[in-house]
Image (tube, coloured by chain):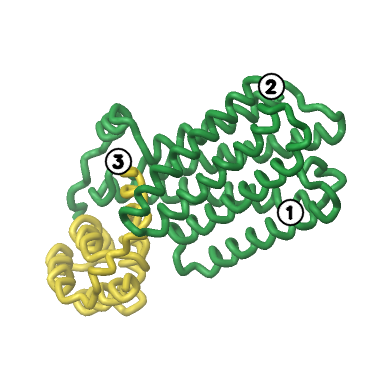
Amino acid sequence: MGTSLFDFAAQKLEQHTGFSQLEARGTLRIAVKSAGLEPNSLGVGELRVVFEKLMPGELDQRGVEDAPSVCEAVMRDLEDAPIDESDASSNNPDDVFRRLAKA
Amino acid sequence: MEGSAYIGGVIVCLGYLIAAARLGRLSLKTGEKPERLLAITFLFWGVAYVGWQLPIVLSDDALVLPLYFSARILTDIGTVLSVFFLRLVFRPGSALATAMVIGITVSVVVGVAGSAWVGDWEALYPLKNLWWWLEWGAVILSMGWMALEGFHHYGMAKMRQRLGLCDALTCNRYLLWGFIGLIWSFYELSYAIQQIEFEVTGLYSTQLDAFASSLEMIPIVLVWFVFFPPAIYQRWIARSDPQPIVAEA
């Protein structure tokens, strides 16, 4: 589930920037990692924050014109992302540690 | 054993048993595995402390061997369950984590069986009994893994916190979790030194005993701050929450 969301977002980034597949995946991976997230356990909400707050800067650094518009386009595409939110893993470490504190 | 160490043991025992009860109650409510695993881990560790303390309280030497050996088994089962927790929560689907869990489990079982085979039921002779090190190595590896996961996830959570993706308390719990693992690792180191000293001299040194006892007590306090943080602590941590960053473009 998480991996396919990463793949989906990387594919959309590739489409909107003209990056190669490798460049798009690498750029997204860097942004996701610098947000303190794991590419294989991403949620849509988290990915939105990455595209809203970090990706514009990453794209700017790589010479992409109008980076904020590119990010907005990818975020719009994320609404159609093939994900199963019902599995928004209750065993995600943040969720587990938040839940355990309610014991 | 020193009086302070004995009192420390009772406090730690109660701490684990109460933590087990509260996490067990939560697991019944949520039906989730992580809380169930931790509840059983703490239950085993708590009951193990009863085994360590009872012969001293009753001053009955005949109970020492069966209760110490039972306590050793319970402690080891708890340790194995704790690494199942680490894998489930921090590294689901990781082949390395699965290998670690299998390796630790096998080392503990073989270490205990080997110790029993050579007659060291109470794990008292690390110099004569080389099986002792297999069990001890597995335990310290578990605790070290716990520390690494805690500190690693603390670093990641700090980054998420800046973006408003993680709250300050959850972030702080990773840090405390890391310290629990680190202090347990130090405890295991001091335990090894104690056992070697005992094997060589036939005595436990008072200072080392008191030091080990304090190392036993600190993690249970941290466990409480992770899972049952007092309101005042929660407010203090929440106040340190930095403002999330705005878009960097």
Instruction: Examine the rendered structure and indicate whether residue A30 appears above or below residue B43.
Output: below
Location of residue B104 (image quadrant): bottom right
Circle 3 crowding by C-alpha within 10 Å: few under 14, some 14–19, many from 20: many
Q: Secondary structure at mark 1?
A: helix
Q: Is residue B172 left or right of residue B75?
A: left
Q: Which residue is mark 2?
A: B2
Q: Which mark is residue B103?
A: none
Q: Secondary structure at mark 2?
A: loop
The answer to whether residue A18 shows anywhere in this view is no
Q: Position of residue A13 (x, y in %)?
A: 23, 73
Q: Is residue B67 left or right of residue B221?
A: right
Q: Which residue is mark 3?
A: B168
Query: What color does chain B have in the rendering?
Result: green
Label 1 is found on which chain of the structure? B
Viewer-proximal residue among B32 and B103: B32
Q: CA distance from mark 2 to mark 3?
A: 40 Å
Instruction: Examine the rendered structure and indicate whether residue B80 appears above or below residue A43.
Output: above
Circle 1 crowding by C-alpha within 10 Å: few under 14, some 14–19, many from 20: many
Q: Earlier in the sequence, mark 1 or mark 2?
A: 2
Q: Residue at x 17, y 66 (%)?
A: A71
Q: CA distance from mark 1 to mark 2?
A: 27 Å
Label 2 is found on which chain of the structure? B
Q: Is residue B145 left or right of residue B1?
A: left
Query: What color does chain A have in the rendering?
Result: yellow
Q: Position of residue B40 (x, y in %)?
A: 49, 51
Q: Which residue is mark 1?
A: B112
Q: Residue at x 65, y 30 (%)?
A: B212
Q: Secondary structure at mark 3?
A: helix
- Disc 1 marks which amino acid? Val
